[in-house]
Amino acid sequence: MSELVLINVSGRDKPGLTSEITGIMGQYDVRILDIGQAVIHDHLTWGILIEIPDASKSSPVIRDLLFRLHALDLQVRFAPITEAEYQTWAAARNRACYIVTLLSRDIKAEQIARVSAITARHGLNIDNITRLSARPSLNPAENRIACVEFSVRGTPSDLEQLRADFLHIAGEMNVDIAFQEDSIFRRNRRLVVFDMDSTLIEAEVIDELALEAGVGKQVAEITERAMQGELDFSQSFAERLALLKGLDEAVLEGIASRLRLTEGAEHLISRLKSLGYRTAILSGGFTYFARHLQRKLGIDYIYANELEVENGKVTGQVSGQIVDGKRKAELLLEIAEREHISREQVIAVGDGANDLPMLSQAGLGVAFRAKPLVKESARHSISTLGLDAILFLIGYRENEEH
């Protein structure tokens, strides 16, 4: 009968090791059942599960490997595996696989301990841990973003409780934690749609307009209640618009010129474009400002509200259909159909209650620096980092930029 052997090798990494080791196995017609390798600070950890056929006894294989690995100054351990152990292990590989993404300014041991404790408590086993961000500086103040990805396997009994547990410790430790199924779509997204105000830009444009009109306090109060989900968006939008009646059209250009992009926005859009993604703004704000961002960032689609102006003055109304939460979700599906992709290949990003419909329609919906109601309702959230942290949710590796 054939023999199953698990081989673990560790030591100083050097070119050609895999070729040397497998070359020896090849002389005995060894079959590879599983293989994995990791290198941390030039230190190699290498594992391989092999099947030695009946015609080749294990002793010569192990003897030759042991002799060569010793010559290479590597440590090695051999462990026999029974057929029953292998069958149990192989069956476990067929269980659902998920990705847990830990995002922070600086990764700490406690963060990994808390995340891994939750996965274990919910019956998930960690298969791999990979750092996606660049290696950090020894001066934490210089580190902009850090990301570690856990590949976990198992069948959690309560997915909602699992997500709630991650959300709880994320708030406690001031980090972001995303949990998603490791499906075929994860690295095959094709379209990203953004809310504009307080998402792509740091301001709420209607509040900026209100300041120019001298009604800033009244409008800001209504805006906040709407974003918290306390008011119907369309109703609150009409109330705020009415307060802008008579505002001089000339102030629009000044507001557009001073709008500040959110941290990471330019980097994110630039990388998405280089990877062939399409992008869109779906905003309850105004097309004048969406067009300004479209020109600046190279956005493919924009949908927002057309601010009505007559004789150089804002009328306090918009022309055409209001882009509210329901309309955003419809537009997401319309653009996906136009691009011939499924909604599972869409990422949606927003911060307010009126973004929840489109977040729920997207394959990956991200609540960005969102209000508590939105963060709790969305499947994923980013609160502590910039927009470009979204890249790591699709498995992007920072060293791929070079």
Image (tube, rainbow, N blue to C red):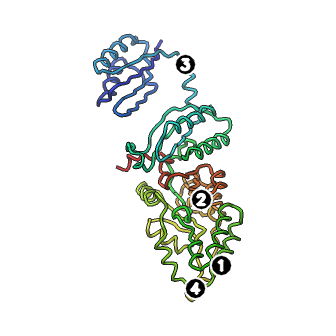
The residue indicated by pointer 1 is: 243
**Mark 2 or mark 3: which comes first in sequence?**
3
What is the CA distance from the residue labelled 2 to the residue labelled 3? 48 Å
| Residue at image point 47% right, 41% down | 107
Where residue 310 appears, x then y in whole percent? 59, 86
Q: Between tags 4 and 1, which lies in front?
A: 1
Q: Quadrant of residue 240?
A: bottom right
The residue to which callout 3 is attached is 85
User: How far apart, in angstroms, are the residues tagged by discs 2 and 1?
Assistant: 24 Å
**Secondary element type, mark 3:** helix
Q: Is residue 37 left or right of residue 90?
A: left
**Residue 206, x across and y down, in percent:** 59, 72
Instruction: Say which label, 4 or 1, has the lower sequence index.
Output: 1
Residue position for label 4: 313
- Find numbered disc 4 in the image and state the secondary structure of the residue it sits on: strand
Q: Amino acid at mark 3?
A: Glu
